[in-house]
Amino acid sequence: MRVEQVMTERVWQCEPDASLRRVMAVMVLRDCGWVPVVQEGRLLGVLTDRDIAVIAWRTDRSLSDLVAADVMTRNVASCAPDDSIVAAELVMRARGVRRLAVLEQGHLAGVLSLDDLARHASQADCWEVPGLGAGQVLGLLCDIVQAPGRGQSEVLSKQPA
């Protein structure tokens, strides 16, 4: 199975000069945590809800004063629509990411997310690997999520000063 058969094509995107306040508002309203930053159809970077939360915590500047280009991740993990699901999964695992920008001749064609893969995991042949069933696919997804630096939780509690 190919990426184009599984990916999400309709992706909300923003321009590099969009304020972080506006981007965050759209993320909340559309329940998305990943927004590509695009100019003239070309992918420049991506913003995650975590990127915005971290910059909000680290700076005294208002989110209205910061723009997408100030915070976006520029080295975006990507794949092509005609790539196999197996190849895309390997990129996700190697980069430790949950989403890949799907690029066609440098232009954003959509996004491939772990949710997309999970929705199609019940199709026995979707990974093009004989004998790989839904259980193994879920194991692969867990491996991606548990990539180095992920999956380690810490309980935060109020400590007496």
Image: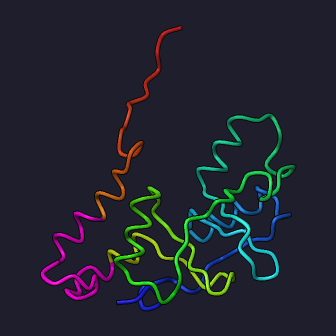
The residue that appears at 16% across and 70% down in the rendered structure is 135
Residue at x 76% of width, y 56% of height: 20
Residue 46 lies in quadrant = bottom right
State the residue at coordinates (55%, 65%): 77
Question: x%, y% of residue 99?
Answer: 49, 67
Answer above or below: position of 37 versus 151. Answer: below
Q: Residue 108: x, y in percent? A: 65, 81
Q: Split into 4 quadrants, where in the image is the N terminus?
A: bottom left
Residue 47 image point, x, y percent: 66, 60
Q: How is the image coloured?
A: rainbow
Residue at screen point 16% across, 78% down: 133
Q: At which x and y percent is residue 101?
A: 57, 73
Say if 78 sits above or below 41 in the image: above
Q: State left or right for residue 102 relative to residue 154.
A: right
| Magenta-drawn segment | 119-140
- Asked whether residue 89 is drawn in magenta, I would say no
Q: Quadrant of residue 44?
A: bottom right
In the displayed structure, 147 sits above or below 54; it is: below
